[in-house]
Image (cartoon, helix red, strand yellow):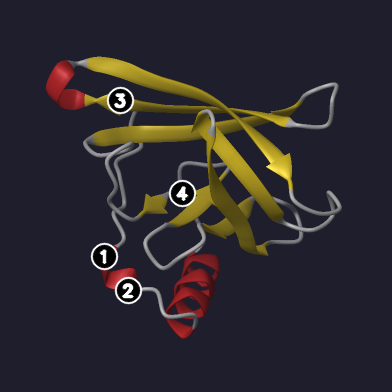
Amino acid sequence: MARFDFRFERGLDNTTAQYSLNPDGSIKVVNRGYKTAENEWKEAVGEARFLENPSVGRLKVSFFKPFWGAYNILSIDGDYQYALVAGDNLKYLWILSREQTIPDEIREKYLSLAKKLGYKTENLIWPKHDR
């Protein structure tokens, strides 16, 4: 739904992230987005690993091994439809949704939490989701 600007997703709309559990307990991550300027879909496949118990929302993710980045679930709704996710510093923040929209009350809850944690939520990009 929303993200900070960074080079891997720059210029992409209709972004999605799909997660699936691998037999070894790691997670396959497939990020996609539509690059309007080039009139084509872009895709990156990576791997995530739990840093602790799988019930704890702390992972590391890599799209370019051997480099890994932090992936911290800051908040998730009870039905696992929406999540607020951050990296290991204030430069990386995402609001994720299983749908193309997010209820106002959840959006405001996540924005409020992110602000309290020091994130500049006014810098969030809300890409189009029309494909």
Distance in Å between CA atoms under marks 4 and 1: 19 Å
Counting other residues with Cα less than 10 Å from the Cα at mark 4, is it few (<14), some (14-19), or many (20 or more)? Answer: few
> Pointer 2: what residue?
120
- The disc at residue 58 is none
- 108, 43: nearer the viewer: 43
Q: Which residue is depicted at the point 30% across and 35% down?
A: 13
Closer to the camera: disc 3 or disc 2? 2
| Tag 1 secondary structure | helix
Closer to the camera: disc 3 or disc 1? 1
Closer to the camera: disc 4 or disc 1? 1
Q: Which of the two labelled residues, at mark 3 and mark 4, occupies the earlier sequence position?
A: 3
Asked whether the residues under the numbered discs 2 and 4 touch, taking CB atoms below 8 Å apart as contact, a structural biologist would say no
Q: Which residue is depicted at the point 39% across and 74% down?
A: 119
Distance in Å between CA atoms under marks 3 and 4: 17 Å
Residue 3 at what x, y percent from top left?
A: 37, 53
Query: The residue under label 3 is which amino acid type?
Result: Tyr
Q: Which of the two labelled residues, at mark 4 and mark 1, occupies the earlier sequence position?
A: 4
> Pointer 3: what residue?
34
- The disc at residue 123 is 1
Query: The residue under label 4 is which amino acid type?
Result: Thr
> Pointer 4: what residue?
101
The image quadrant of residue 77 is: bottom right
Distance in Å between CA atoms under marks 3 and 2: 25 Å
Query: The residue under label 2 is which amino acid type?
Result: Lys
Asked whether the residues under the numbered discs 4 and 1 touch, taking CB atoms below 8 Å apart as contact, a structural biologist would say no
Residue 83 at what x, y percent from top left?
A: 60, 56
Query: The residue under label 1 is which amino acid type?
Result: Asn
The image quadrant of residue 24 is: top right
| Tag 2 secondary structure | loop
Asked if residue 98 is positioned above or below residue 109 in the image, the reply reads above
